[in-house]
Image (spheres, helix red, strand yellow):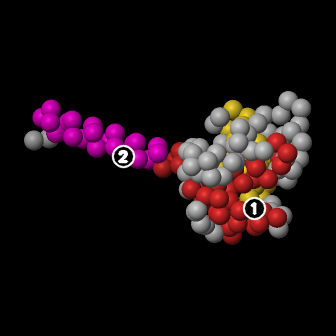
Amino acid sequence: MVGTPIALRKRVLTRLRCTSVALITVLAACGFDPAGSQQWEPPTVYREWWDKTQACSGLSGNFDRVEWLIVPGPSFACSSGNCVGHWDPGHKIFLASTWTAHEMVVRHEMLHDLMRRSGHPSPPFGNGCPLTWETWPSDQQASPVPEGAAKLLD
């Protein structure tokens, strides 16, 4: 019965589902892409940092699957506000250019890739791998924190 309320409701629900699936697909394809980001070859020390991050977390992953992107400046817009680093589920790590030599910032994003998720559970963050601003020993800073720079990691 094409004209019954039940048949109409089913057609409306089917259309809503199709529209929702299409919208989710489009949004997922957009991804995270801060202005000015460029692919770059990570320095060799990053492999050492990757190994250290695997060791402290007990997780393993493929360093070569990560796509490294650098964003000019001390920070960039992200879901948390302004960030110095960001991990994307497509195995992309974005780093603000000012922070590419800061071991904690880089390893923090590496740990996200090894976990394959966002969020900061302890362990491995904090307890196990001291890769947050609160847990990282200040005497291990590889580069000074620029005055007024955002210190959010995403």
Q: Can residue 44 be seen from the camera position used here? A: yes
Which residue is pictured at 56% across the width and 56% down the height?
116
Q: Specify whether 59 is left or right of 148.
A: left
Instruction: Name above or below for residue 62 compared with residue 142.
Output: below
Q: Specify whether 19 is left or right of 35.
A: left
* Disc ID at residue 15: none
Q: What amino acid does circle 1 point to? A: Trp
Q: Answer with the quarter of the image where residue 73 lies.
A: top right
Q: Which residues are magenta?
A: 3-24
* Disc ID at residue 49: 1
Mark 2, residues whose alpha carbon is within 10 Å: few (<14), some, or many (≥20)? Answer: few
Q: Can residue 65 be seen from the camera position used here? A: no
Q: Is residue 109 magenta?
A: no
* Disc ID at residue 18: 2
Which residue is pictured at 82% across the width and 67% down the height?
44
Q: SS class of the residue under badge 2?
A: helix
Query: Which numbered disc, 1 or 2, marks the residue that appears first in the sequence?
Result: 2
Q: What amino acid does circle 2 point to? A: Cys
Q: Answer with the quarter of the image where residue 84 lies.
A: top right
